[in-house]
Amino acid sequence: MEKTHLKTGIFGGTFNPVHIGHLALANYLCEYEDLDEVWFLVSPQNPFKKNVHLLDDRIRLEMVEAATAGYPRFHASDFEFSLPRPSYTVDTLQKLSETYPEREFVLIIGADNWAKFDLWKSPEEILRKHRILVYPRLGYELHIPDKVSGCVKAVHTPLLEVSSTFIRQAIAGGKDVRYFVHPATFRIIQEKQLYQLSCSV
Ligand code: ATP
């Protein structure tokens, strides 16, 4: 008998910090698409592309853990922290599939990334081995060519155009933007006094 694989959406990002745009999107995909879970894969700092705005890997992970803890279908993952850097999606998906053979990994990307998917490392291999869910982003047309429509699906999620950059800048400017992040994430931001200096945004 064929084994049923747990359908696991992979949602990667720097999550600096994770916000309601990320959470609402992943929540929608769990409830309206055939995903059992969504894993938030926190991207570690790329040593070759030092980003001064990027908070420590562990703190970003902690904020994702806090935001995702209350919903059993969400999982915060540090899987890429132990992979060679920079980590390419094709390699991460390969390692994930080897490590968790009982799961089917479905890639979740925005229309912005889909528009340049051809430039990624080994796009054909990703398409051969994985399904992709593409969600809309403001300002990007979402077109799925017929030849890949079997494995790539456009999902019509409601758009919440919030960005981490907006949140970092708002906090540095002394604004109280608590409703743009999960309360547990906001608590960490306050306790650790994150993003307070304008040079860190
Ligand atoms: P920054 O402003 O620092 O660039 P961001 O808000 O875009 O950050 P990322 O951590 O880069 O957040 O996002 C991870 C993934 O989530 C990216 O692929 C990005 O396209 C997507 N994303 C970002 N904001 C939203 C949003 N409001 N709704 C849905 N997806 C989003």
Image: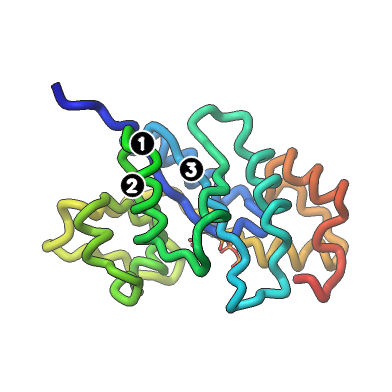
Judged left or right of residue 191, residue 185 is: left
Asked if ligand 1 lies within 8 A of label 2, the reply is no
Dot 3 corresponds to which residue? 39
Within 10 Å of disc 3 (Cα), the crowding (few <14, some 14-19, many 20+) is: many
Name the one closer to the observer, 192 or 94: 94
Which tag, 2 or 1, sits closer to the chain's start?
1
Which residue corresponds to the image point at 28% horizontal and 69% vertical from the top-left?
Answer: 122
Dot 2 corresponds to which residue? 106
Which residue corresponds to the image point at 77% horizontal and 64% vertical from the top-left?
Answer: 170
- Find residue 21 and report its horizontal and vertical position in percent: 56, 52
Dot 1 corresponds to which residue? 35
- Residue 182: image quadrant is top right
Q: Which residue lies furthest to the top in this view?
A: 1
Q: How many angstroms separate mark 2 from mark 1 (CA)?
A: 8 Å
Which residue corresponds to the image point at 79% horizontal and 71% vertical from the top-left?
Answer: 200
Which residue corresponds to the image point at 38% horizontal and 38% vertical from the top-left?
Answer: 100
Name the one closer to the observer, 165 or 176: 165
Asked if ligand 1 lies within 8 A of label 3, the reply is no
